[in-house]
Image (cartoon, rainbow, N blue to C red):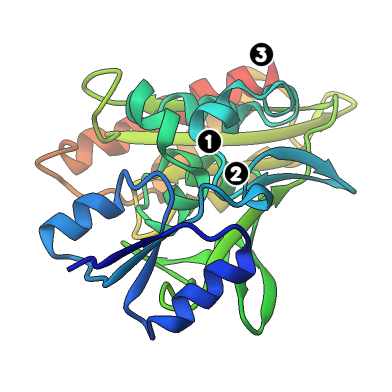
Amino acid sequence: MVEEYLFPSSVGEALDCLEKYGGEARIIAGGTDLVLQLKRGGVEARALVDITRIPELRGIREEGDYIVVGAATTHTEVAESPLIQAKAKVLAMACKSIGSLQIRNVGTIGGNLVNAMPAADSAIALTALDAEVEVVSKEGSRWVPISRFHQGVGRCCVDATRELVRAVRFKPLCDNEGSAFKRLARRKALILPILNVGVVVGWEDGHFTRAAIAIGPVAPVPFRAKKAEDVLIGAPVSRESVEKAAWAAFEEARPRSSLLRGSAEYRKEMVQVLVRRALMEAAGI
């Protein structure tokens, strides 16, 4: 049972709170996932440590070669950021598709990552962007490649009893790069995706020089379609190249049948459709 609700004013104070309760405290920001887990008994805590009043965890900024997004930044703030829209469109599109307006207004990008669902919209976009996640503890901080951040359904590399996510960072896209996000669901809001796809591509002299294709949920973690990416590298920027990559993604994806999301056969077919649409948009074909 939750006995205390704490409002630290710094990351250091938040970590002190976690230490004080010896593993019986949990970080909370938007609470859109954690509150449900507490009610269902999936998570137990004596104290909740609210990080929404910590300035360094909020906001979007350019820092050196990176765009840095604070962990407590809401999905709405990310989706509406001119910087994200211009330099990481895939992330703006993904955050705009999450939940409902009310959920986007309170849910945070850090919370979406730590919840570690393989179809989390922002996680798919950040996987396509080759993002890194900053994890902080009393011992210091480390940047974790997003490819190593997720460890299975509902599991990530963060020790929730003593660590928190401070930020996520990625390199902004250049003028010769594009991105896109596609989501398939039974309705437009408040529903889990049947499938979602985030892509980033780059080109030079009419040929693809960069390709990242992230798909969910077709594995326990956000999935990179590496074979499809390899098909694109060095290929002409054309519909034919995109069709070949979409087919390769179809062949390597292994979705499971789900009562909530549909049959494996249907979802596998839709991998090809969504990858094709996302690549066409990202490459401006």
Compared to residue 236, the image places residue 168 above or below, namely below
Q: Compare marks 1 and 2 and give the one earlier in the sequence.
A: 2
* Label 3 crowd (10 A; few <14 / some 14-19 / many >=20): few
Residue at 39%, 27% (x, y): give it. 183
The amino acid beneath tag 2 is Ala
Q: Secondary structure at mark 3?
A: loop
Alpha carbons under labels 3 and 1: distance apart: 17 Å
The amino acid beneath tag 1 is Gly
Q: Name the residue nearer the viewer: 250 or 49.
A: 49
Residue 128 numbered tag: 2
Contact between marks 3 and 1 (CB within 8 A): the answer is no
Rendered location of residue 279, percent (x, y) = 59, 26
Residue 285 numbered tag: 3
Residue at 56%, 61% (x, y): give it. 165
Contact between marks 3 and 2 (CB within 8 A): the answer is no
Query: Quarter of the image containing the C terminus?
Result: top right
Compared to residue 182, the image places residue 135 above or below, namely below
* Residue at the disc numbered 1: 198
Alpha carbons under labels 1 and 2: distance apart: 6 Å
* Label 1 crowd (10 A; few <14 / some 14-19 / many >=20): many
Q: Compare marks 3 and 1 and give the one earlier in the sequence.
A: 1
